[in-house]
């Protein structure tokens, strides 16, 4: 069998989690199923702090990147442009058969554009997600990436439906969500949190919240009135925004450094419920049977709202307060919305046959 060369492009924290399980599935397919796939990872350097990047490679045994472009932070156009240039150079030097991308970050967009300009097929993991809010940078990144991808791996049947609505029907596969694979695979490695007593887990980093003082204040006022402490592993973007606006966190909030994947699993397992504006955490909460209060006006995971696992509250203080009561009640959902934890194996099988 001829060897198929895959180049994977990652750059931001959630992509490391997703790439971890697919990289493992590639090695497994090579060892057990006679597959002949090679993988080289290009890290754009979008996330560069140890706690946002290296710790994930270490904990999750992700193969070391073949190269780190060290692009770092900056304006979207500037960083995406630098990534596009850097990735193109790497793809020219490495001549892969396929470029593998994850999610909806600027690193995803740059990888997709660099690949198609060189007529290389793109495989997009987490295809078809839509918030229908085009002011979100992620929404534009998704639409563009999906439009130019050859293989589109959807985490849910609603994602497939969204693609169909846009006329994208070729190469679409509903494989389930690789984040569920990661959660099930690594859950026994969870690091127990040190906090005593009941607590809620929060994350907050979306530009639409951190860069809008009124929204940030609305959310923090909700947090201030929480009856239980809220553990907030703080994203560097949020920390900077608080300083710039001159806001301090209420006493109910216990901050800590960005959590590693295993720390996050421990917090998720032990918390009463979740408050977040992240995409991934909404699903992780549901898999671990925790209710989720989503600090956004829309979600890509509508099935969770319909199943009453998730409530959209935006940045509205009174809606947050109402949801805090709702959230602290038991949850038991048996529907497997996002697959069975074998999504990565399916992806690899399809790529091998492609
Ligand atoms: C990016 C993704 C978002 C994803 C998130 C996960 C885009 C458009 N957004 O958002 O979809 O949910 O990653 O975290 O790609 N910073 C550091 N150290 C780091 C990384 C970032 O200090 O290691 C700071 C920088 O000041 C930077 C800011 O955080 O300006 C934002 O980082 P950036 O990568 O632009 O976007 P995120 O908000 O992390």
Image (cartoon, rainbow, N blue to C red):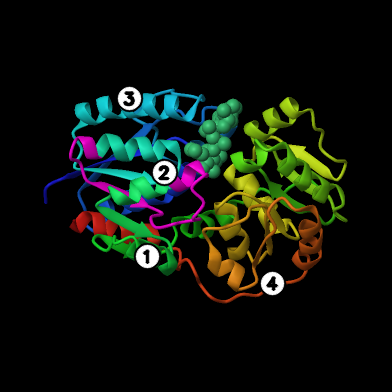
Foreground tag (2 vs 4): 2
Q: In the figure, is residue 249 to the left or right of 120?
A: right
Question: In the displayed structure, would residue 232 be above or below residue 164?
Answer: above
What distance separates the C-alpha of mark 1 from that of mark 2?
17 Å
- Specify the label residue 141 is tagged with: 2
- Counting from the top left corner in percent of width and height, residue 185 is at 50, 57
- Specify the label residue 160 is tagged with: 1
Residue at image coords 76%, 54%: 200
Foreground tag (3 vs 2): 2
What distance separates the C-alpha of mark 3 from that of mark 2?
18 Å
Marks counted in the figure total: 4
Image quadrant holding the C terminus, namely bottom left
- Specify the label residue 331 is tagged with: 4
The residue indicated by pointer 3 is 86
User: First in sequence: mark 1 or mark 4?
Assistant: 1
Report if the beta carbon of the residue with label 2 is closer than 8 angstroms to ligand 1.
Answer: yes
The magenta region covers: 116-140
Secondary element under disc 2, as helix, strand or loop, is helix
Secondary element under disc 3, as helix, strand or loop, is helix
What distance separates the C-alpha of mark 3 from that of mark 1?
32 Å
Report if the beta carbon of the residue with label 3 is closer than 8 angstroms to ligand 1.
Answer: no
- Graded by Cα atoms within 10 Å as few (under 14), some (14 to 19) or many (20 or more), the crowding at tag 3 reads many
Question: In the displayed structure, would residue 341 be above or below residue 295?
Answer: below
Foreground tag (1 vs 4): 1
Secondary element under disc 1, as helix, strand or loop, is helix
User: First in sequence: mark 2 or mark 4?
Assistant: 2
What distance separates the C-alpha of mark 1 from that of mark 4?
27 Å
- Counting from the top left corner in percent of width and height, residue 194 is at 78, 45
Determine if residue 56 is in view. Answer: no
């Amino acid at each position: 069998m001829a060897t198929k060369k895959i180049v994977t492009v990652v750059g931001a924290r959630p992509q490391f989690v997703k790439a971890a399980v697919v990289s493992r599935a590639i090695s497994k397919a090579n060892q057990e199923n006679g597959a002949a796939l090679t993988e080289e990872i290009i890290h754009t350097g979008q996330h560069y702090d140890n706690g946002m990047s290296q710790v994930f490679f270490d904990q999750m045994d992700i193969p070391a990147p073949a190269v780190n472009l060290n692009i770092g932070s900056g304006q979207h156009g500037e960083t995406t442009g630098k990534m596009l240039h850097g990735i193109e150079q790497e793809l020219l030097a490495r001549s892969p058969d396929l470029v593998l991308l994850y999610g909806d970050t600027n690193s995803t967009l740059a990888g997709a554009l660099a690949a198609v300009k060189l007529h290389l097929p793109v495989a997009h993991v987490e295809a078809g997600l839509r918030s229908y809010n085009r002011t979100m940078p992620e929404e534009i990144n998704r639409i563009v990436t999906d439009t130019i991808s050859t293989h589109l791996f959807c985490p849910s049947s609603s994602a497939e439906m969204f693609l169909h609505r846009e006329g994208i029907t070729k190469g679409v596969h509903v494989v389930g969500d690789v984040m569920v694979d990661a959660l099930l695979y690594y859950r026994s490695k969870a690091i127990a949190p040190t906090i005593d007593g009941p607590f809620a887990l929060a994350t907050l980093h979306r530009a639409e919240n951190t860069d809008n003082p009124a929204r940030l204040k609305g959310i923090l006022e909700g947090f201030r009135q929480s009856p239980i402490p809220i553990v907030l592993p703080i994203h560097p973007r949020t920390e900077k925004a608080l300083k710039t606006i001159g806001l301090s966190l209420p006493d109910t909030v216990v901050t800590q450094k960005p959590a590693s994947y295993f720390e996050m699993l421990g917090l998720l397992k032990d918390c009463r419920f979740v408050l977040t504006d992240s995409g991934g955490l909404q699903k992780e909460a549901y898999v671990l049977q925790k209710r989720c209060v989503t600090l956004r006006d829309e979600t890509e995971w509508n099935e969770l709202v319909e199943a009453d696992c998730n409530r959209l509250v935006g940045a509205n203080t009174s809606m947050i307060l109402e949801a805090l009561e709702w959230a602290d009640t038991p949850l038991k959902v048996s529907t497997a919305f996002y697959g069975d934890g074998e999504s990565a194996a399916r992806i690899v099988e399809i790529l091998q046959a492609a």
